[in-house]
Image (cartoon, helix red, strand yellow):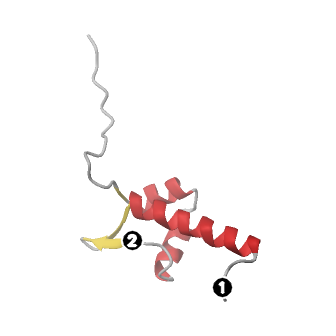
Amino acid sequence: MKLKNTKRKPSGRSQIMTPKEAAKYLGLHPITVYRLIKKGQLPGFKLGGQWRFKKDLLDSWIASKINKDSEQKDGTASI
């Protein structure tokens, strides 16, 4: 008897993460995630009074951080 793979895959919709899941995905401590939310630096939203994060927005946030860092190293960042 074979068991079906029980891992859920997003079905065309963006994956929604909890702060703990987002922290693990980003390689951060959960407290750091909450600090970034409080500063308005991390894209998230409240759903039922609890913070949630869309994976694709986190990916975009990471890409913007990478681009910003590479521009600063190149000296092409505008002040």
Question: Quarter holding the N terminus?
Answer: top left
Residue 68 as seen in the image, left or right of residue 36: right
Decide which of 59, 74 is in the foreground and name it.
74
Q: Secondary structure at mark 2?
A: loop
Measured as percent of width and height from the top left, residue 38 is found at: 47, 81
Seen at 54% across and 63% down, the residue is 63
Mark seen at residue 29? none
Mark seen at residue 44? 2
Seen at 50% across and 67% down, the residue is 61
**Vertical order, 72 against 66 (above or below):** below
Seen at 46% across and 59% down, the residue is 22
Which residue is the extreme one toward the top?
1
Measured as percent of width and height from the top left, residue 5 is found at: 31, 27
**Vertical order, 43 against 22 (above or below):** below
Disc 1 vs disc 2: which is toward the camera?
A: 1
Question: Quarter holding the C terminus?
Answer: bottom right
Please name the residue that numbered disc 1 is placed on: 78
The quadrant holding residue 45 is: bottom left
Callout 1 touching callout 2 (CB < 8 Å): no
Name the residue type under label 1.
Ser
Q: Secondary structure at mark 1?
A: loop
Residue 6 as seen in the image, left or right of residue 74: left
